[in-house]
Image (cartoon, rainbow, N blue to C red):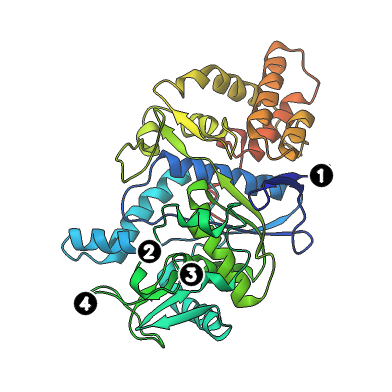
Amino acid sequence: MTFRLFTSLGNEVRTFSPVKEGEVRMYVCGVTPYDVTHLGHAFSYVQFDTLRRYLGWIGYRVRYVQNVTDIDDDMIMVSRRQGGRPIAEIRDENDAILRADLDRLNVLRPTVYPYATDHIPEIIETTQRLIERGHAYVVEGDVFFDVSTFPRYGRLNGMSLEELGKRENPESKRAHKKRNHLDFLLWQQVDPGDPSWDSPWGPGRPGWSIECTAMAVKHLGTQIDIHGGGSDLKYPHHENEIAQAECAYGVEPFCGWWVHNGMLQLDGVKMSKSLGNLVLARDLMRTYEPDHLRLYLLSHHIRADANYTAGAIDALADRYGRLRAAAQRASDGPGAGSAPMLQDARERLDDDFDVPGALDAADRAAARVLAGTGNEDEADRLRQTLAVLGFAFAGARGPANGDFSP
């Protein structure tokens, strides 16, 4: 069977083929831990965890990197608001909460979990490369990427420079110093008292997008297979990552598949910290079993925007009960857990990672198992399918079952 996956670069579904045979290099943008994380983060990381698991099931060795952006404007703002509390303390507190939530949802630990602040040398080295290659320039201690030197800028979003220029851009700072409107900071001067590091251009700190480029290259190489993140990161963050990596290292493409998850909304409005309309995974898991919440999150296609409403998880209670009860009828003993997946579920996953379709197939199989009309090994196939989708009750490895290894 052939696995086909959508990529935002070109807006097409293509047969998946990694750079190195048998190996997948996967980078997923992590959080900026200046505050609590919410159900939208859980949606993203459960989806990419499931993609990672399926790639492993079909025979790939997956190296999965998920970063922590622990230095940026928001981290500094919260530190100031809390009377100069060390950023590392704020990071560690919120990261521990996120990690506990994801552990309960049985999300596998990343192969590498890098902090941006641990990669300042790599960030400086990448910035120097861009300057030397004529893609960046220095103005009084600030270093900007020169978008005019990269003709493919905008391709990920399918937009011209003029169209991009009309969009909101959180990296469009210090306009009075820039050559072009879309140029963005690679390295920046800081206000007195703010965190800073020595650099060839004076004390300062990294821009936002250069952090992920440096960490991805450090831990995965100059060409990767899958880059994941929310659809809200396509511009400017991921557009900038492409420009930086391809210009600094002379590669094309930097990434073969750009996979963007949809946004989780609350009553039709994007869930975000800035709006304060947050639903927290840990609060929901006081009422619902973590696997029940995982089922809700996986009931939406990875690219689809999901609208959370009161009662949405309750609506899946019957399905959740069927899947659990049917999986418990699988055989035990030697060889248990080695059954193949349900054929129709695998066909749905191979067709652009259609997890909701695979769950529909699993539910039909569960009904047959409970009615006694299924094939002899159907319960075993069902449990295997649910384990590949990461459900702890089906025996999927992961933190919820005591396995904290990557």
Name the mark nearer the viewer: 2 or 3. 3
Q: Earlier in the sequence, mark 3 or mark 1?
A: 1
Q: Residue 192: which numbered mark, if any?
A: 4
Q: Quadrant of residue 247?
A: bottom right
User: Which residue corresponds to mark 1?
Assistant: 2
Tag 4: amino acid:
Pro
Earlier in the chain: of badge 4 and badge 1, it is 1
Closer to the eye: label 3 or 1 = 3
Whether 190 is drawn above or below 351: the answer is below
The answer to whether 306 is drawn above or below residue 243 in the figure is above
160 versus 179 height, above or below: above
Snapshot quadrant of residue 88: bottom left
Q: Is residue 329 visible?
A: no
Query: On the image, numbered disc 3 is attached to which residue?
Result: 210
Tell me the amino acid under the disc marked 3.
Ile
Question: Badge 3, how many Cα within 10 Å: few under 14, some, many 20+?
Answer: many
| Separation of marks 4 and 1 at Cα, in angstroms | 56 Å
Task: Name which of mark 4 and mark 2 comes first in the sequence.
Answer: 2
- Is the Cβ of the residue at disc 2 closer than 8 Å to that at disc 3? no
Regarding residue 129, the answer to whether it shows in the image is yes
Q: Nearer the viewer, mark 4 or mark 2?
A: 4
Mark 4 or 1, closer to the camera? 4
Q: Residues within 10 Å of mark 1 (few under 14, many from 20)?
A: few
Image spot of residue 364 (x, y percent): 70, 19
Task: Assign a secondary structure to mark 3.
Answer: helix
Residue at image x 35%, y 83%?
A: 141
Q: Does the residue at mark 4 contact the one at mark 2 (Cβ under 8 Å)? A: no
The percent position of residue 20, horizontal first and vertical second, equals: 76, 64
Residue highlighted by disc 2? 70
Q: What secondary structure is marked by label 2?
A: loop
